Image (tube, rainbow, N blue to C red):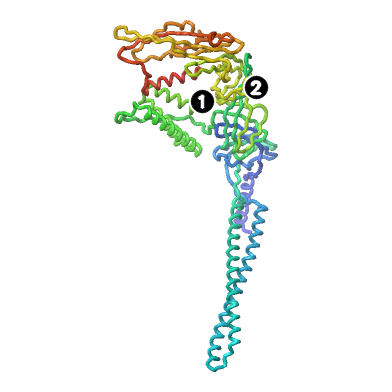
């Protein structure tokens, strides 16, 4: 062999060694799901995969990823001494073995095809018989003609032949009709069986979702790899059970999570965390884009509330669309596009703030904050949890709390004659409570459904415990006196609030009423009953300036009818005598009232 040939062989050999040493051995494993962080609409799943002895480059294939996995969300980490070089997502089409029901259909198809071949043979035989009769007729007719010309025609023989031919024609026609109908039935059965087989075999090939992790192990020995990915089709919402005994100083609060999990994989014996955040897969901070504005004709419809509500609805819808586009852009990895849609989501509401009246802008901004933001908390559940992938909802216990409670009764006779039980609870736990619906129990009996607001650790909140059946509240207009002073009219109103207590125990009642909230040139003078208002500093800071009245009253036992507890107050309104009192209307005033009311609800 020449020296040049030896050189070529040597190069090929060296290349083979180099390429062979760099190829990562492929290891296939399913791993086990160790932990899940469940968000609102998505979940972050983490699998643990053990990689046994080996050193250098390793290619780890993690199989059986769920159907609703987000392919762009995969990332991995490993123990010290092992580096993750890359993570790739891939799908692999595999064929499944035929099922028993498919085999049965195929066996039936074979039988139908056999019957079809037999039917076709019978049709060919009938066609052959028909041809034979045609030949017989073509032979008999000339023969009869010749014999008639010679005067030797045998009439009996002709009759016999003619009868035979017609009888065979009738029989062949009946047989042909029968085999034709059989052919039609066989064709229909074969079509139905083929359709059923196609439906069943449509899933005989399926796509496997896999994660391919490229590792570099610095030393031999077992190591642990953590693969994480985001799945859709999973969400949770808070749910509460409130339980209390009358006269006690505490109330039980069961904090549960209602879970919907349809990701395509079961979570068995996992560490489950519930979160109100979102699985952000981007590390870049947002960038603020310029907001270009211009002028247009004055919007006369701005003064109409319906038009403003329509504008707000349009802006809200636009915000949702932009948020969806932004998320899709992040999924595709287009950071410029994602940043653009993030800015577009804010443009609509900034424009709103620039041209609507201030109270409306404040209300709109508050609604946006409530809808698209909120308290970001994580609840790590104790122990391990099992959450299967299925359509029906599942319940997980977040916490079982005993909270200090101050019970009282609330009466608002302007709205209803019923008096409601109410407790002021203090969240002494270390966890925050999210806004959610609650089932309320008193003395073990279900009394109704309520709402638990968003409550931070250490914050107080109110919880209702249904109607107090032994209490009633009434409101009466005792008198209305009017007089004129110069250019003004002064009207004095005298109201009486009546509280009935039919039980054999005294009752604490928090009694509410209200004064008009004056606008323009209206003066209100408080005359009687206002010195008895409660002394709560929070009430005087938030509610009192808005004309809300509150008295804290102890109603003796068996106080009703003639012995009912009475509270009276009087006030006067002074205004131009040429005007009358009416409700303030208009978008700006209504928005102002709504903003005040929402402030009360948050404090309440």
Q: List the residue tagged with mark 2.
A: 444
Label 1 or label 2, whichever lies nearer to me, is 2
| Left or right of 288 on screen, residue 430 | right
Residue ID for mark 1: 374
Q: Is residue 498 visible?
A: yes
In this view of the protein, can residue 213 be seen by the observer?
no
Q: What is the count of numbered marks?
A: 2
In-front residue for pair 207/513: 513
Q: Tell me, for residue 285, which label it has, or none.
A: none
Q: Using the image as rendered, state which of residue 545 and residue 182 is in the foreground.
A: 182
Examine the rendered structure and indicate whether residue 114 appears above or below residue 513. below
Q: Nearer the viewer, residue 235 or 495?
A: 495
For the point 68% across and 53% down, which residue is it? Answer: 100
> Which of the pair 159/531 is nearer the observer?
159
The quadrant holding residue 594 is top left
Whole-percent x and y of residue 529?
Answer: 46, 6
Q: Residue at x 62, y 67 (%)?
A: 117
Q: Secondary structure at mark 2?
A: loop
- Where residue 230 sits, quadrant-wise, is top right
Dot 2: within a 10 Å radius of its alpha carbon, few (fewer than 14), some, or many (20 or more) residues? few
The mark that comes first in sequence, 1 or 2, is 1
Along the horizontal axis of the image, is 562 left or right of 251? left
- Identify which residue is drawn at 60% across, 17% down: 428
- How packed mark 1 is, by other alpha carbons closer than 10 Å (few <14, some 14-19, many 20 or more), is few
Image coordinates of residue 282 in percent, x first then y, are 51, 33
What is the spatial separation of the Cα atoms under label 1 and label 2, in whole angstroms? 33 Å
| Quarter the N terminus occupies | bottom right
In percent of width and height, residue 164 lies at 60, 80
Disc 1 and disc 2 in contact, CB within 8 angstroms = no
């Amino acid at each position: 062999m020449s020296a040049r040939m030896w050189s070529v062989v040597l190069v090929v050999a060296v290349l083979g060694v180099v390429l062979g040493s760099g190829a990562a051995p492929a290891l296939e494993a399913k791993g086990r799901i160790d932990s899940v962080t469940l968000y609102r609409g998505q979940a972050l799943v983490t699998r643990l995969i053990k990689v046994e002895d080996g050193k250098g480059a390793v290619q780890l294939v993690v199989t059986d990823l769920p159907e609703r996995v987000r392919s762009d969300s995969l990332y991995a980490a490993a123990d010290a001494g092992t580096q993750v070089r890359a993570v790739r997502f891939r799908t692999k089409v595999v064929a499944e073995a035929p099922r028993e029901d498919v085999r049965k259909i195929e066996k039936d198809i074979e039988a139908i095809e056999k019957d079809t071949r037999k039917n076709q043979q019978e049709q060919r035989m009938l066609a052959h018989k028909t041809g034979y009769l045609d030949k017989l007729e073509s032979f008999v007719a000339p023969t009869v003609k010749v014999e008639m010309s010679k005067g030797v025609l045998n009439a009996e023989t002709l009759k016999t032949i003619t009868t035979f031919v017609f009888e065979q024609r009738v029989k062949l026609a009946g047989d042909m009709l029968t085999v034709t109908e059989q052919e039609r039935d066989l064709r229909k059965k074969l079509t139905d069986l083929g359709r059923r087989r196609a439906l069943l075999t449509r899933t005989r090939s399926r796509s496997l979702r896999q994660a391919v992790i490229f590792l570099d192990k610095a030393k031999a020995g077992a190591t642990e790899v953590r693969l994480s990915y985001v799945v859709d089709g999973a969400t949770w919402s808070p749910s509460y059970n409130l339980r209390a005994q009358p006269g006690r100083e505490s109330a039980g609060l069961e904090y549960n999570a209602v879970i919907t999990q349809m990701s395509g994989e079961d979570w068995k014996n996992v560490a489950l965390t519930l979160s109100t955040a979102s699985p952000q897969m981007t590390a870049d901070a947002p960038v603020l884009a310029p907001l270009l504005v211009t002028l247009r004709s004055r919007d006369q419809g701005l003064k109409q509330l319906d038009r403003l509500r329509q504008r707000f609805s349009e802006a809200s819808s636009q915000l949702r669309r932009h948020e969806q586009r932004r998320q899709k852009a992040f999924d595709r990895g287009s950071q410029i596009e994602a940043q653009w849609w993030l800015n577009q989501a804010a443009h609509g509401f900034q424009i709103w703030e620039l041209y609507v009246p201030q109270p409306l802008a404040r209300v709109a901004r508050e609604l946006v904050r409530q809808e698209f933001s909120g308290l970001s908390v994580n609840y790590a559940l104790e122990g391990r949890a099992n959450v299967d992938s299925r359509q029906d909802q599942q319940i997980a216990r977040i916490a079982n709390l005993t909270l200090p409670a101050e019970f009282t009764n609330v009466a608002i006779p302007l709205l209803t004659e019923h008096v409601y039980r109410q407790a002021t609870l203090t969240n002494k736990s270390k966890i925050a409570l999210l806004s959610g619906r609650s089932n309320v129990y008193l003395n073990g009996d279900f009394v109704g459904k309520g709402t638990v607001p968003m409550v931070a650790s250490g914050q107080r909140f109110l919880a209702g415990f249904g109607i107090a059946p032994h209490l009633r509240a009434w409101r009466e207009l005792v008198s209305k006196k009017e007089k004129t002073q110069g250019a003004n009219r002064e009207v004095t109103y005298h109201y009486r609030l009546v509280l009935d207590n039919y039980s054999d125990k005294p009752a604490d009642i928090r009694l509410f009423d209200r004064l008009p909230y004056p606008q323009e040139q209206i003066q209100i003078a408080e005359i009687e009953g206002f010195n008895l208002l409660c002394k709560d500093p929070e009430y005087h800071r938030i509610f009192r300036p808005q004309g809300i009245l509150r008295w804290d009253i102890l109603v003796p036992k068996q106080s009703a009818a003639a012995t009912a507890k009475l509270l009276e107050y009087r006030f006067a309104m002074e205004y131009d005598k040429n005007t009358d009192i009416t409700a303030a209307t208009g978008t700006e005033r209504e928005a102002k009232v709504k903003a005040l009311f929402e402030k009360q609800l948050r404090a309440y």
